């Protein structure tokens, strides 16, 4: 017959075994989690991850984290990183004083937006036909004012972006674009669907054709259209609106020549979505294939760095 002392010893042994088992499970789970860690938003250890990005963003020298990651480097990435390391080696304080970071950024980067040159859409017209169909004078004035905004939102990249892509975070596209505005200086994917609808109403067919050509050039380059036109967006996707954009353009212009030339790239984007952006969902005993926009990166979003750190 077991004594209370024997029972106590057995309980201790069981508890020890359980603790060892639990420890093994924790290690195994942690190891599995480490294997699933996604890569950073892009390879750039200036614009997407790394000590330089972290120190600049956490210094709060800009109210908006997007400002820094939209700035052009004055020197090559290798030279810029070496200058950063030299600066850090001469500063004892951690984190480094904001004034030192500010001086470093001013010495090594151009202002955000310096990748663009002045551009006025060649197909913009003061009085597109749709204005005549608006009877109410106040609404017609409102629509006319909206039509004027196209000139303010047009962006054309300097040729230097094509030649020295490694100095910029922006993705080079060959034709001018209409951007959302404000802090959003580059193209955005599904925003462009609504922009293109407005441009077609304003009879700006050449601008739309150029924007569509830009999009298929991005598909040709990286396989799909990312969230927006910066390297730090290239792991993220938005709803796939390219084919609907093309449809409304073709319906309006009957430009079948453009379609014949680029149909294979529309198919390429579709294939990307079916291969990389679908999940199986079960409902009432039936399986459905659901497409989703997604992202494959880890770490803070570069353009919202501080917000993500403190989230």
Image (cartoon, rainbow, N blue to C red):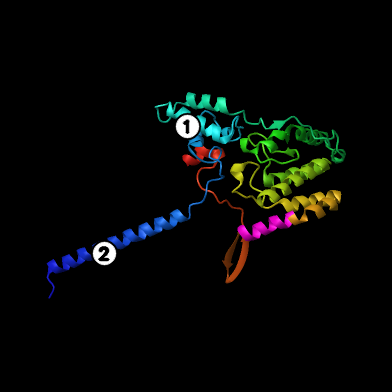
Front one among 260 and 159: 159
* Residue 10 in view (yes/no): yes
Q: Which residues are magenta?
A: 265-276
Q: Is residue 117 magenta?
A: no
List x then y, in percent, for residue 272: 65, 57
Q: Which residue is mark 1?
A: 85
The answer to whether residue 310 is left or right of residue 288 is left
Quadrant housing residue 46: top right
Number of marks drawn = 2
Q: Nearer the viewer, mark 1 or mark 2?
A: 1
Front one among 139 and 228: 228
The answer to whether residue 118 is left or right of residue 23 is right
Q: What element does badge 2 sit on? A: helix
The crowding category of the residue bearing disc 1, from other C-alpha atoms within 10 Å (few below 14, some 14 to 19, many at least 20), is few
List x then y, in percent, for residue 24: 33, 60
Query: Is the stretch drawn in magenta largely helix, strand or loop?
Result: helix
Give the residue furthest to the bottom: 1
Quadrant housing residue 113: top right
Q: Residue at x 48, y 23 (%)?
A: 99
Q: Which residue is mark 2?
A: 17
Of the image marks 1 and 2, the number of the one nearer the N terminus: 2
Front one among 211 and 286: 211
Tell me, for residue 29, which label it has, or none.
none
Q: Residue at x 51, y 43 (%)?
A: 300
Q: Residue at x 73, y 30 (%)?
A: 117
Task: Please state, as top left, top right, bottom left or bottom right, where the N terminus lies in the image.
Answer: bottom left
Say if mark 1 contacts mark 2, CB within 8 Å.
no
List x then y, in percent, for residue 102: 52, 26
Quadrant housing residue 276: bottom right
List x then y, in percent, for residue 214: 73, 44
């Amino acid at each position: 017959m077991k004594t209370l002392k024997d029972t106590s010893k057995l309980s201790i042994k069981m508890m020890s075994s359980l603790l060892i088992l639990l420890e093994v499970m924790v290690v195994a789970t942690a190891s599995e989690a480490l294997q699933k860690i996604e890569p950073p938003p892009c390879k750039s250890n200036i614009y997407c991850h790394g000590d330089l990005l972290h120190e600049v963003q956490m210094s709060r020298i800009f109210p908006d984290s997007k400002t820094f990651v939209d700035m052009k480097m004055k020197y090559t990435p290798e030279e810029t990183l070496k200058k950063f390391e030299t600066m850090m080696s001469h500063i004892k304080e951690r984190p480094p004083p904001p004034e030192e970071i500010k001086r470093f950024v001013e010495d090594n980067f151009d202002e955000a937006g310096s990748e663009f040159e002045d551009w006025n859409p060649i197909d913009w017209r003061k009085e597109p036909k749709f204005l005549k169909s608006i009877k109410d004078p106040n609404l017609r004035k409102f629509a006319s004012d909206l039509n004027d905004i196209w000139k303010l939102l047009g962006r054309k990249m300097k040729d230097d972006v094509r030649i020295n892509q490694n100095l910029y975070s922006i993705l080079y596209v060959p034709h001018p674009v209409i951007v959302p505005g404000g802090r959003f200086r580059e193209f955005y994917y599904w925003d462009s669907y609504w922009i293109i609808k407005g441009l077609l109403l304003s009879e700006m067919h050449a601008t739309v054709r150029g924007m569509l050509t830009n999009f298929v050039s991005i598909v040709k380059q990286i396989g799909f259209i990312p969230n927006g036109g910066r390297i730090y967006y290239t792991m993220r996707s938005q709803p796939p609106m390219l084919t609907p954009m093309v449809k409304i353009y073709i319906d309006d212009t009957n430009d079948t020549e453009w379609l014949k030339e680029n149909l294979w790239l529309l198919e390429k984007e579709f294939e990307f979505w079916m291969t990389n952006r679908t999940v199986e969902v079960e409902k009432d005993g039936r399986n459905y294939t659901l497409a989703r926009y997604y992202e494959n990166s880890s770490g803070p979003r570069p353009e919202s760095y501080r917000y993500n750190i403190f989230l």
